[in-house]
């Protein structure tokens, strides 16, 4: 796992489209620790409530 100093110096960012396959905080936390910088939601799929729940999960995973 890269240290926080190397992550801040990296110019290339890792972007992931998050959906039902990674619908738990533990998976999102692992993705963040692996270097994920940006989470993208495809708003063409699912409803508002599902996206709101996913945003809450991402925020929770980022705090851990």
Image (cartoon, helix red, strand yellow):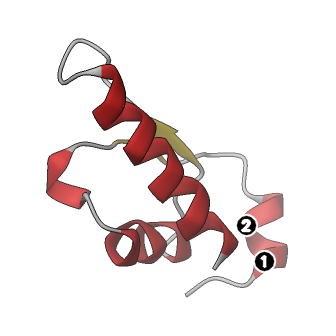
Label 2: element kind: helix
Of residues 24 and 17, which is closer to you in this image?
24
In the rendered image, residue 26, in percent from the top left (x then y), is placed at 37, 78
Crowdedness of circle 1 by 10 Å Cα count: few (<14), some, many (20+)?
few
Identify the residue under disc 2.
Answer: 7
Label 1: element kind: helix
Q: Where, by quadrant of the figure, is residue 63 drawn? A: bottom right
- Residue displayed at 60% across by 51% down: 37
The label number, if any, that marks residue 13 in the structure image: none
In the rendered image, residue 34, in percent from the top left (x then y), is placed at 48, 74
Up/down of 56 relative to 62, above or below? above
Of residues 26 and 14, which is closer to you in this image?
26
Q: Quadrant of the C terminus?
A: bottom right
Extreme front residue here?
49
State yes or no: discs 2 and 1 in contact (Cβ < 8 Å). Answer: yes
- Residue displayed at 34% across by 30% down: 49
In the rendered image, residue 41, in percent from the top left (x then y), is placed at 38, 30
Identify the residue under disc 1.
Answer: 4
Tell whether 64 sits left or right of 53. Answer: right
- Residue displayed at 62% across by 46% down: 12
Up/down of 37 relative to 8, above or below? above
Spatial separation of the CA atoms under disc 2 and disc 1 = 5 Å
Q: Quadrant of the N terminus?
A: bottom right
- Residue displayed at 30% across by 67% down: 24
């Amino acid at each position: 796992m890269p240290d926080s100093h190397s992550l801040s110096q990296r110019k290339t960012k890792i972007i992931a489209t998050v959906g039902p396959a990674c619908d738990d905080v533990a998976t999102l936390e692992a993705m963040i620790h692996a270097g994920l910088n940006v989470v993208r939601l495809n708003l063409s799929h699912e409803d508002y409530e599902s996206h709101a729940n996913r945003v809450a999960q991402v925020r929770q995973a980022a705090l851990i």
